[in-house]
Image: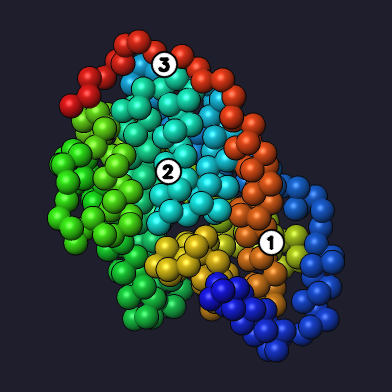
Amino acid sequence: MFGLAAVGAMVFAALHFGDLESFGSMLRRARPLWLLAAAGLQISTYILVSMGWKLVLDKAGTPLPLARLIPVAVSKLFADAMVPAAGMGGNIYLVRRLVKLGIPRGTAVAALLISMIGYYAAFALSALVMLLMLWLHGKATPLLAGIVTAFLLVALAIPGLALWLRQRGSRPLSPLLEHIPVVRSLLHVVGEAPKALVADKRLIMGVATCNGAIFLVDAATLQICLVALGNRGDFGTAFIATIGGSALAALAPIPMGLGSFEAGSTAMLSLLGVPVAAALAATLLLRGFTLWLPLLPGLAMMRGSRGRRRPARSRPSVPAE
């Protein structure tokens, strides 16, 4: 409800300070070919996510083709959105789905853990680049620096917590920590990841590169949305808005970052000279491509995954510790 209220507040602000007629006409005049290009870019993000998992599976000697992994990436988005489970719904689904495809559970957990580390590593680097770009534009205020610093602490804490729990194995935690939902959820899965995979720095760098490319694709999608609405699309501006909105969404305790991403992205675009109405319209288009449109195919693929279990391989290539 708070997220929906935030979205409503942003729409009200755009309509109040902007021009109601121009806001609606921008959406009506959006150029279809540019929107198709934005959709094509977003399809590539699921390929990149699947490539990150494939790097781990190939390293473990249990490869799967991208054609089998891409539907998992799409359905994981639906699980993340609709089964939050303290932020672990999609991650638990990923492990179960890979096991169903014949991947040893330890390797599936390693794919989850390494993808989590790679994601936050790429996110943290992107946030630092965003802050540097804001400084070059003369817009790096203390407030923005504080937001980036707070996000960097979170970006380090989450994979650090996962690695710590992996080192502890499945031993019980103190009652205080056990009552934290995300800690309890992580404890049930990460202890099974093989150390040989989790400690492979080159593998982590490869997965982080795939995740970094996703942030660049999202920024390019926002840039195309601006162009589709008849505005000048600058990639640097779109990148700052995408990372700024994503960082704010990561800090806000709201499922799917609903409202917080829209507010952060719109504010960043407006700060860099994009009219508020155009900034909000482009941000809403981006969210449509990244969040709302994939939900229906994600649901269909999740339901379609309830098939026969593929036989597990008899010999894992990486010994579990």
Please, is residue 152 above or below residue 273 in the view?
Answer: above
Question: Which quadrant is home to the N terminus?
Answer: bottom right
Instruction: Label 2, secondary structure: give it.
Output: helix
| Protein image colouring | rainbow
Q: Is residue 30 left or right of residue 172?
A: right
Q: Residue under circle 2?
A: 91
The answer to which quarter of the image holds residue 60 is top left
The local crowd at label 3, few if under 14, some if 14 to 19, many if 20 or more residues have their Cα within 10 Å, is: some
Contact between marks 2 and 1 (CB within 8 A): the answer is: no
Report the residue that reaches farthest toward the top: 314
In percent of the image, x 57 and y 40: which residue is there? 75
Q: Is residue 237 left or right of residue 171?
A: right
Q: CA distance from mark 2 to mark 1?
A: 26 Å
Contact between marks 3 and 2 (CB within 8 A): the answer is: no
Instruction: Label 1, secondary structure: give it.
Output: helix
The amino acid type, in three-letter code, at marker 2 is: Asn
For residue 57, say whether it is visible: yes
3 or 2: tag closer to the N-terminus: 2
The amino acid type, in three-letter code, at marker 1 is: Leu
For residue 114, say whether it is visible: no
Q: Residue under circle 1?
A: 285
3 or 1: tag closer to the N-terminus: 1
The amino acid type, in three-letter code, at marker 3 is: Ala
Q: Residue under circle 3?
A: 312
